Image (spheres, rainbow, N blue to C red):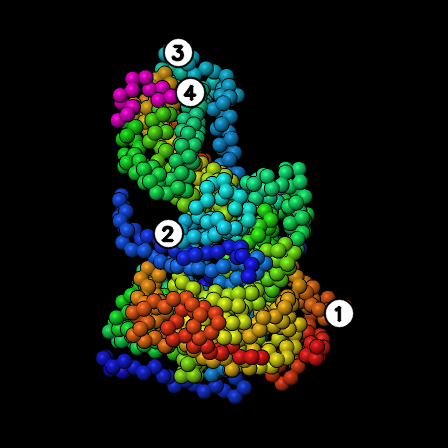
C-alpha cells in the first residue's frame, strides 16, 4: 500500500472556558476534537460526516493551522505540520488549501474577484511572477466555469453558486495537493449543489487533488467520497470505504444517522429501517464518561459507562468504536 | 419572520446580479454608497454647509474685506449697519469679520483632533481587537481609565496648568482625552469583522497579520468609524467652544466663537446680537457635521452590516 | 373549565360546507417595490388545503414559497410588499379583505405558523413557559395558574422532558431541537385548524430533524389539522406529505400526490431537481444538474419562466406562459409539453 499523503495522529483540541475579568481562570474545557486519527491517500476523497458539535469544523481549522492543537500531530510528507518553522509552514500553505462553506461571507466584499483569486500570488509571489498573474487568474476563473471577463466585478454581483466557484478558484491558485472542503455545498440551493459537486470532481481528476470533504449531508458525502469517517462529539466512531459505511454500518450512531436521512423516494423511505434517537447531543464541555454516545444509544449497557471503546475493526473489516458493534443494513437497496 | 423573507430574497438578490448582470459600471460598495448619497437631501445640505465653512476657514478674505484686528474703540457696540452687517463688538472690531475668522479655529481644531484621534484609534483599536489577550487587556484598561474622566472636566484640569493655551495645547489636550472613545469604536468594529470567513481564508492562504488587518479587517470595519468621526468633528468644535467660553480654552487674542460668546454673555440683555451671531454659526457648524454623519450612516451601514 | 384541572385540548371544529376547503389560496400575487425595481415574488399561486391533509410546498430560495405563506398569515411588511391580486379563503372567508381585528383573531388561534429559526422567533428575555402561557392568557383569558398548567401540558405533548421544571427556562437554555418543540407548542396552543411550517427542520441536525418530523406527523394525526409544509428538501417532503406543489420563480409549476411526483414528474423543473440530488442508497457517477441559475425576479423570463434552463424547450415556450394543465384528476403541470416529460 502506498504511503499516505497526510497522516493525522491523536489530534486533540480543547478550548478553555474562562471566567474572570483581569486574571482569567480556567473552569473547564470544550473538548471540540478529542483524539482523531486518520490517513489521507493521494488522489482520494475522505468524507467526514457528523452533526453539530462533532468537531468537524474545528478539525478543518486545525488542518489549516488556523488553530493550534492541544496535542497530536499531522504528518505531511513525513513532517508534522504543527511543529514546522515559519518558513516551512509558508511553503506548506501552498500544498494544503481550504474551501469554506458560506459563499456570502467567505469573500471580502470590498475586493474584486480578480483581487480575491489573485491574492494567493501576492502572498506567495514566488509561485507566479507579476507579469503572468492576470492571465493566470483569468485561467482559474475559466477553469471553474466563470467568465474571465468578470475579473473586475465584486462578489455581490454574483449568485451563491458562482461565489462558491470563486472560492474554489482561490483555493486552486497555489496548485495545492490537498483541499479541505468545509461544507462546500451546504449553503447552496439544491439545483446548484450538483453543479458545484461535479466541478469539484472534475477538478480532482484534472489536477490530481486529494480532498477532505467535510459535510453533514450524508447523500452528498457518499457521492463525493471514496472513504468516510463518522464523527461524534470530537471522536471518529467509524471509518471505512463508502460502501462499508453506507451498506455495512456497524456503529449504532452511524446506523441512526443513516436511518434519519429522509429519502426523497417515498417508496424507499418506507423501506428504510427506523431508528429514532432519544434526547440531545451532550455538551462537548461535559461529555459522558466511557463511550460518549451511550446517553442516546439504543444498545447502551453498564460496560459503556465504564470503558471508552477504542476505534478498531470488530464485527466488520473496518474500524468502529462500539463494544457491541454489529453490522446492520439500514439503507434500502433500490 | 424577516429570516424567512431574507431567505427568499437572498436568492433574489444573488439572482438579480447573476450571469445576466451587464452593467460595467464601478460596483464597489463605496461607489454604491456614493450613488445613494448623491440623492440624499440631508447629505447634500450638510456637505454644502461644511464645504462652505471650510472655504470660510481657509479663505476668510473671500467673505470680508476688513481685518478682524482693525478695532477702533470709538465705534464700540454700534448696531448692525450697511458696512458692518453684524455690528461692532465691545472692542470696536467689525463683528461680522470676527465671526467669519472664528470659523478657522473651529475647523482646524475639529478636523485635526479628529484626525489624530482616529489615527491613534486605528492603530490601538485594531491591535486590541485583532490580537486580543494581553494586548487587548492593556489597551482596554487604558481606555477605560481615561474614559472615566469627563472630557470637559479633564480638559479644565489639564489646561488650567498650561499658561500659554494656544491652538497646539488645546488640540493636544482634546486628542489625549478623545482617543479612547474612537479606540473603543474601532476595537468593537474590528472584533465584529475579525472572525469573518474571508479573514480566515486569508490567514489560511498564509497572509501575515499586517496584510490581514490592512487589506481585510480595516476596510470592512471602517464604516462605523467614518460615521462617528464625522460626528466627532462637530462634537470637538462644540467642546473647544465650551472650553473657550469657560475661559480655560483658547485665550485672547485668539478668535474663537466660544470666546466671543463668553464676552457677549454678560451683555446679552443690552446687545443680544453679540451672542446671537457666533452662537448661530457655532450651532450650524456643529449641526452640519452631525447631520452629515447621519446621512453617511444610512448610506454606509445597511450595506455593510 | 375548573381552575385546577388542565383542559384536554380538543375542540369541536365546525364542519366545512360542501365544496368548501379549509384553506383556499386563489391566484395570489405579491410584489415587492424596491428602489431598484419591482420584485414579483409570488405571481398567481393557487392551492387548497383540507383537514387532516399535509400539503408540501417545494421550492428553492427565490421561488416565493415563504412569501406566499407569509401573505396568508398576514405578516408581510406592507410596504414594501403589496398583495396585487388574489384571495386567501379560510373556511370560505377571504382573509385579505377582512378587517384587521378579525384577522388577528384568526391568526394564531385558527391558523398558526412555525419558522425555521426558533431562536429568533422566540423572545429571549422571557421564560419559555411564560411565552406559551401568554397564548392562553391573551386569547382565552385564562388566569396565570391555568395558563401555566396548560403550558406544561403542551410541553409534555411536544415531548419536552421534565416539562414541569423546564417551564421556567429561557430559550437559549434549550437545544435547537427542543426550541423547535417549544415553537410547535406555542403554535398549537389554541388548537389551530391550519399549521404552516416554514422550513421547520432546515437548521436542525438530521437526527433531530427525524424526531421533529415524527412529532409533527403524530400531532397532526391527533388533532386532524391541516399542515402546510414549506421546504426545499425532497426527502422531508417524501416523509410526510400527501400532496406536493412545486414552486419556481413565484409560480406553481406542478402539483401532484407525493408518490406520483417522484415516480413520474410532469414538469421539467421537477424532473431536473430529482435527477440532480445525490442518493443515499448508491454512489452514482456524475450528477445531472439543472443548467443555469434561478431567474432574476425583477426580470422574469418571458413565456415560461423556466425556459432558459429547460431541456425540452421549444419556440412557443419563450412566448406563451403555460397555464396549469390538468394532467390527471389530481395532477397539474405548467408545461406545454408535459406529456413528453411524463414519457421521457
Is residue B142 shown above or below A326? above
User: Which residue is label 1 attached to?
Assistant: C314
Q: Please provide percent x and percent y for residue C169.
A: 29, 65
- State the mark number for residue B98: 4
Which is more N-terminal, label 4 or label 3? 3
Give the farthest residue toward the left. C4
Q: Nearer the viewer, residue A325 or B271?
A: A325
Give the farthest residue toward the right. C315
Magenta segment: B157-169
Could you classify mark 4 by the number of other residues whose Cα lies within 10 Å: few (under 14), some (14-19), or many (20 or more)?
many
Q: CA distance from mark 2 to mark 1?
A: 62 Å
Q: Quadrant of the C terminus of chain C?
A: bottom right
Q: Nearer the viewer, residue B128 or A109?
A: B128
> Measuring 32% from the left and 37% from the top, which residue is drawn there?
B138
Give the farthest residue toward the front. A1
> Measuring 35% from the left and 38% from the top, which residue is drawn there?
B135
User: Which residue is label 2 attached to?
Assistant: A70
> Measuring 61% from the left and 58% from the top, which residue is drawn there?
A204
State which mark lies toward you, 3 or 4: 4
Q: CA distance from mark 3 to mark 1?
A: 93 Å
Amino acid at each position: 500500500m502506498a504511503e499516505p499523503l497526510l497522516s493525522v495522529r491523536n489530534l486533540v483540541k480543547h478550548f478553555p472556558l474562562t471566567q474572570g475579568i483581569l486574571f482569567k481562570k480556567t473552569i473547564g474545557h470544550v473538548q471540540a476534537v478529542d483524539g482523531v486519527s486518520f490517513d489521507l491517500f493521494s488522489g482520494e476523497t475522505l468524507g467526514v460526516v457528523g452533526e453539530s458539535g462533532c468537531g468537524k469544523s474545528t478539525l478543518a481549522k486545525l488542518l489549516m493551522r488556523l488553530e493550534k492543537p492541544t496535542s497530536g500531530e499531522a504528518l505531511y510528507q513525513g513532517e508534522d505540520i504543527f511543529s514546522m518553522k515559519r518558513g516551512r509552514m509558508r511553503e506548506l500553505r501552498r500544498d494544503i488549501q481550504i474551501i469554506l462553506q458560506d459563499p456570502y461571507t467567505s469573500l471580502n466584499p470590498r475586493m474584486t474577484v480578480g483581487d480575491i483569486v489573485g491574492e494567493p500570488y501576492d502572498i506567495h509571489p514566488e509561485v507566479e511572477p507579476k507579469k503572468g498573474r492576470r492571465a493566470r487568474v483569468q485561467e482559474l476563473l475559466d477553469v471553474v466555469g466563470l467568465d474571465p471577463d468578470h475579473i473586475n466585478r465584486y462578489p455581490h454581483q454574483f449568485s451563491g453558486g458562482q461565489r462558491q466557484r470563486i472560492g474554489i478558484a482561490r483555493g486552486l491558485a497555489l496548485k495545492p495537493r490537498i483541499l479541505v472542503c468545509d461544507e462546500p455545498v451546504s449553503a447552496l440551493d439544491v439545483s446548484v449543489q450538483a453543479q458545484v459537486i461535479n466541478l469539484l470532481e472534475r477538478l480532482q481528476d484534472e489536477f490530481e487533488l486529494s480532498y477532505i470533504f467535510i459535510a453533514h449531508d450524508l447523500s452528498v458525502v457518499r457521492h463525493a467520497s471514496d472513504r468516510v469517517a463518522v464523527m461524534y462529539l470530537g471522536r471518529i466512531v467509524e471509518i471505512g470505504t463508502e460502501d462499508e459505511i453506507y451498506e455495512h454500518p456497524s456503529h449504532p450512531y452511524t446506523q441512526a444517522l443513516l436511518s434519519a436521512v429522509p429519502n426523497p423516494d417515498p417508496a424507499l423511505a418506507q423501506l428504510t429501517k427506523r431508528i429514532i434517537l432519544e434526547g440531545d447531543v451532550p455538551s462537548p464541555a461535559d461529555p459522558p464518561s466511557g463511550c460518549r454516545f451511550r446517553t442516546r444509544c439504543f444498545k447502551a449497557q453498564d460496560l459503556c459507562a465504564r470503558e471508552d471503546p477504542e476505534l478498531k475493526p470488530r464485527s466488520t473489516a473496518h474500524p468502529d468504536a462500539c463494544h457491541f458493534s454489529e453490522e446492520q443494513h439500514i439503507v434500502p437497496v433500490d | 419572520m424577516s429570516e424567512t423573507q431574507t431567505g427568499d430574497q437572498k436568492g433574489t438578490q444573488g439572482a438579480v446580479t447573476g450571469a445576466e448582470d451587464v452593467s460595467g459600471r464601478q460596483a464597489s460598495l463605496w461607489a454604491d454608497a456614493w450613488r445613494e448619497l448623491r440623492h440624499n437631501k440631508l447629505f447634500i445640505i450638510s456637505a454644502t454647509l461644511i464645504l462652505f465653512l471650510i472655504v470660510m476657514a481657509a479663505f476668510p478674505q473671500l467673505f470680508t474685506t476688513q481685518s478682524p484686528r482693525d478695532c477702533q474703540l470709538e465705534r464700540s457696540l454700534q448696531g448692525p449697519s450697511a458696512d458692518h452687517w453684524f455690528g461692532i463688538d465691545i472692542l470696536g472690531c467689525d463683528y461680522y469679520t470676527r465671526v467669519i475668522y472664528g470659523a478657522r479655529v473651529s475647523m482646524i481644531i475639529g478636523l485635526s483632533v479628529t484626525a489624530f484621534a482616529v489615527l491613534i484609534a486605528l492603530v490601538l483599536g485594531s491591535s486590541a481587537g485583532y490580537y486580543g489577550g494581553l494586548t487587548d487587556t492593556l489597551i482596554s484598561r487604558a481606555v477605560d481609565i481615561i474614559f472615566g474622566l469627563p472630557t470637559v472636566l479633564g480638559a479644565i484640569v489639564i489646561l488650567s496648568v498650561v499658561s500659554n493655551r494656544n491652538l497646539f495645547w488645546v488640540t493636544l489636550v482634546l486628542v489625549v482625552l478623545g482617543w479612547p472613545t474612537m479606540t473603543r469604536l474601532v476595537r468593537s468594529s474590528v472584533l465584529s469583522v475579525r472572525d469573518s470567513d474571508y479573514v480566515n481564508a486569508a490567514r489560511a492562504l498564509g497572509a501575515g497579520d499586517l496584510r490581514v488587518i490592512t487589506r481585510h479587517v480595516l476596510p470592512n470595519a471602517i464604516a462605523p468609524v467614518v460615521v462617528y468621526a464625522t460626528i466627532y468633528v462637530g462634537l470637538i468644535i462644540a467642546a473647544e467652544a465650551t472650553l473657550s467660553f469657560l475661559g480655560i480654552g483658547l485665550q485672547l487674542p485668539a478668535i474663537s466663537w466660544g470666546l466671543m460668546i463668553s464676552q457677549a454673555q454678560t451683555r446679552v440683555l443690552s446687545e443680544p446680537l453679540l451672542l446671537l451671531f457666533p452662537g448661530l454659526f457655532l450651532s450650524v457648524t456643529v449641526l452640519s457635521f452631525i447631520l452629515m454623519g447621519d446621512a453617511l450612516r444610512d448610506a454606509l451601514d445597511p450595506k455593510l452590516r | 373549565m375548573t381552575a385546577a384541572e388542565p383542559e384536554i385540548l380538543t375542540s369541536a371544529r365546525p364542519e366545512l360546507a360542501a365544496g368548501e376547503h379549509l384553506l383556499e389560496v386563489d391566484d395570489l400575487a405579491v410584489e415587492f417595490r424596491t428602489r431598484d425595481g419591482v420584485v414579483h415574488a409570488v405571481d398567481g399561486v393557487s392551492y387548497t388545503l383540507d383537514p387532516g391533509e399535509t400539503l408540501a410546498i417545494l421550492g428553492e430560495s427565490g421561488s416565493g414559497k415563504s412569501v406566499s405563506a407569509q401573505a396568508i398569515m398576514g405578516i408581510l411588511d406592507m410596504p414594501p410588499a403589496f398583495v396585487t391580486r388574489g384571495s386567501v379563503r379560510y373556511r370560505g372567508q377571504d382573509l385579505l379583505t377582512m378587517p384587521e381585528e378579525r384577522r388577528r383573531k384568526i391568526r394564531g388561534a385558527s391558523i398558526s405558523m412555525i419558522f425555521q429559526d426558533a431562536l429568533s422567533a422566540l423572545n429571549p428575555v422571557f421564560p419559555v413557559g411564560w411565552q406559551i402561557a401568554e397564548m392562553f392568557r391573551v386569547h382565552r383569558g385564562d388566569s396565570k395558574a391555568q395558563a401555566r398548567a396548560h403550558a406544561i401540558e403542551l410541553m409534555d405533548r411536544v415531548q419536552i422532558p421534565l416539562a414541569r421544571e423546564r417551564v421556567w427556562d429561557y430559550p437559549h437554555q434549550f437545544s435547537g431541537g427542543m426550541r423547535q418543540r417549544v415553537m410547535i407548542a406555542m403554535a398549537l396552543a389554541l388548537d389551530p385548524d391550519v399549521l404552516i411550517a416554514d422550513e421547520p427542520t432546515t437548521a436542525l441536525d438530521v437526527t433531530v430533524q427525524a424526531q421533529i418530523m415524527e412529532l409533527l406527523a403524530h400531532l397532526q394525526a391527533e388533532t386532524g389539522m391541516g399542515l402546510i409544509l414549506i421546504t426545499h428538501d425532497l426527502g422531508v417532503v417524501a416523509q410526510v406529505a400527501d400532496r406536493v406543489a412545486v414552486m419556481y420563480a413565484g409560480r406553481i409549476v406542478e402539483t401532484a400526490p407525493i408518490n406520483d411526483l417522484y415516480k413520474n414528474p410532469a414538469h421539467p423543473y421537477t424532473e431536473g431537481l430529482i435527477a440532480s440530488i445525490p442518493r443515499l442508497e448508491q454512489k452514482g457517477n456524475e450528477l445531472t444538474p439543472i443548467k443555469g441559475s434561478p431567474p432574476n425576479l425583477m426580470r422574469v423570463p418571458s413565456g415560461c419562466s423556466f425556459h432558459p434552463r429547460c431541456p425540452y424547450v421549444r419556440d412557443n415556450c419563450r412566448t406563451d406562459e403555460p397555464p396549469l394543465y390538468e394532467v390527471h384528476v389530481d395532477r397539474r403541470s405548467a408545461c406545454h409539453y408535459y406529456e413528453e416529460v411524463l414519457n421521457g
